[in-house]
Image (spheres, grey):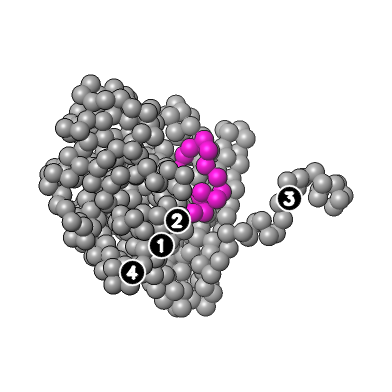
Amino acid sequence: MSCNLVNQETFKGGVDTEDIFRFADELGPSKIIHIYEPSVGLKAVLVVDNVAAGPSIGGVRMAPDVSTEECFRLARAMTLKNAAAGLPYGGGKVVVYGDPKMAPEKKIELMRALASSLREIKEYIFAPDMGTDEDCMACVKDEIGRAAGLPRVIGGIPLDEIGATGWGLRHATEVALEFCDFKLEGARIVVQGFGAVGKNAARFLTENGAVLVAVADSLGTIYNPEGLDVDALITLKEAGGSVVNHPEGERLERDAVIDIDCDIWIPAARPDVLNEDNVHRLRTKLVVEGANIPITPGAEEYLHEKGILCVPDFIANAGGVICAAMEYEGSSECAVLQAIEAKVRINTRIMLKESTSKGILPREAAVDLALTRIRKAMGYRRWSLFSSAPGFV
């Protein structure tokens, strides 16, 4: 095949060196790997971002509409999250193209193929994320021995079962309220997304006096100004139902969750659910980001200008990765919960004090905190993004 034919046919669509490195900056990413195995229909992307502090750790996300850009943004969020949490790990992420509700045996087949294809990429440690769970990580562990978020029976601390991310969100919220003019007792909360993160955040916050007035999943929103029964909603979801099937509330469209008047609004689903086109509809006093990159930069700026406090994702939702990292190192469940509480509370308070004193966005203060730690780690390396030492990953 001639070079001319390759340029015209194989690379039709304008892929060139500039496009390939469009995400590159001083922090990374050190690797972007596209994985394809047609025998099982596997299409996936791995982004290993910055590993100056240690190997990257980040979840495997499954959805039909993921992209390389989303994977990079999530990996970068993990770099910042791990640094802000003071963990000796860098940021990484895998996205798998597929329906997360596919048959379990098909999902396991894909996860085993994915793990095998990345066997030699030792600077990435697998963990669960949206669309994957501890059963998936058990298969990865069996294939290559490099996974966190495992079932209890093989030594894991199931982060979804203990509600690690939701536990962290509770503590981030409590600290953020020190900078607000209302208390958690009686505060009306709305949760967008009722998976592992959303349901546990709702559970922990309502146990401490908050009132869940609305929640949404992929099929719609359920609203009750008098309060929803969190335990009943969790039971409904675990049985395979939708929150809209809950009998004690008004059923609304999925996106109506943005319009409901509340004190605390928690996005706990997909990226960019709040953006420049819809953020003006939000009626709340405090946003605590449970999902990764759930709000666009422009929308965060709008919230700041309107006096709505917004706790960024990689500060608020660090509980999951703290749990995964400590499990990987052999810690106990008790130690994990204590560490999440301490780290999330300290970092939320540092960030909000810095934001308040300097008059900057909370995200700017959070990024400054993380970048200071990342650059210090990079300063110890001969090469900024990797080490040539034997055994370093």
Highlighted magenta segment, given as a residue range: 56-73
Say the numbered circle drawn on residue 301.
none
Q: Is residue 72 magenta?
A: yes
**Quick check: can you spot residue 313?**
no
SS assignment at label 3: loop
**Quick check: can you spot residue 9?**
yes
Which of the two marks, 4 or 2, is nearer to us in this view? 4
Q: Quadrant of residue 339?
A: bottom left
Label 2 crowd bin: few (<14), some (14–19), many (20+), radius 10 Å:
some
* Structural distance between the alpha carbons of marks 4 and 3: 43 Å
**Residue marked by disc 3:** 14
Marks 3 & 1, CB-CB < 8 Å contact: no
Q: Is residue 16 magenta?
A: no
**Residue marked by disc 1:** 80
Q: Amino acid at mark 4?
A: Gly
Q: Amino acid at mark 2?
A: Pro
Which residue is painted at 73% across and 46% down in the image?
Answer: 13
**Residue marked by disc 4:** 359
Marks 1 & 2, CB-CB < 8 Å contact: no
* Structural distance between the alpha carbons of marks 2 and 3: 28 Å
Determine whether, in the image, residue 52 is placed left or right of residue 88: right
